[in-house]
Amino acid sequence: MILASNPLYCLKPFEEVLEMIQQHYEGWEFLSENEHSWNNRAHILDALSTTDIYVQIHAPFNDINIAAMNPSMAEASITEIERSFKLASMLDADMVTVHPGIYSPMGRFWDGAKARAHKSLKRLSSLAEEYGITCALENMPDLDVTMGVTPEEMLEFIRSSELSFCLDVGHAYTGGFLDEFLEIDIVPANLHLHDNEGKLDEHRTLGAGDIPFEPTLKKLYRYEGHFVIEGRNIDSLVESKIYLENLLDKL
């Protein structure tokens, strides 16, 4: 199944976005923040009771850092992510995508940042098992503050925590690591698709950048999950869906 996703939609009422998405898609991976957070679970449950749309959840990442130098901040971040696990369990949504930690301003000079991230991810793995959901760790774009950029680092995180893997093709392409990610021995449990020219995390419409999607998808022949398109707006999401459907028909 092809799913839609746009983090900015969490700033709009859940019912409004749901109505728009289901006109074009059978599935939606929504970011559990702001209007779409645990605090608004009653509205979300009520809205979804009127439709059979398939949903997945992206855990919150704004103001979240599971690798924070301050242990209280790391703990608070885990608590916020756990709420997305609770929400997924309530909705019978079996997939939650999470981000690794990030480097705080002094984090790159602190040799405990990676250790804090590993410890937090192990906690999240245990919580995901407790709530009966699959938690997939997403690779990040090549930025100064991001962890989980390279295949080697992602493999370390995944193997130490026993989390599943969400391959973000657009993120992998920004660092020039896409081919390497396609060669690792872990089959993704979730897949994010958007386009760029290899430098910035632009989230362009599929086909509007340089990512070679046809050979990429051919190399992902073992993948059995859903295809999550991340777009900037509904027009881009619709155009990308048509592009992907045409591409999948060829494979």
Image (cartoon, rainbow, N blue to C red):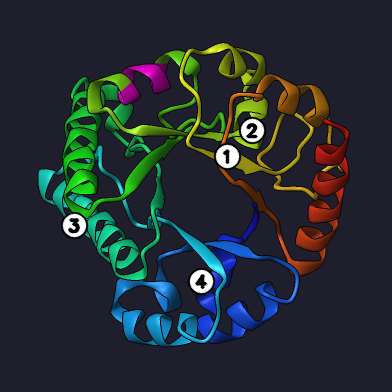
Left or right for 211, reference 18: right
Tell me where residue 117 appears, x and y as whole percent: 25, 32
In what quadrant of the picture does the C terminus appear? top right
Q: Secondary structure at mark 4?
A: helix
- To which residue does mark 2 refer? 169
Q: Residue 79's mark?
A: 3
Q: Nearer the viewer, residue 196 or 18?
A: 18
Local crowd at mark 1 within 10 Å, few (<14), some, or many (≥20)? many
Q: Secondary structure at mark 2?
A: helix
Query: Which region is colored magenta?
Result: 153-158
From this view, report whether residue 77 is shown above or below residue 190. Answer: below
Q: Residue at x 28, y 33 (%)?
A: 106
Amino acid type, mark 2: Val
Instruction: Indicate which disc, 4 or 3, sits on the residue closer to the N terminus.
Output: 4
Q: Nearer the viewer, residue 1 or 81?
A: 1
Q: Mark 4 highlights which residue?
A: 10
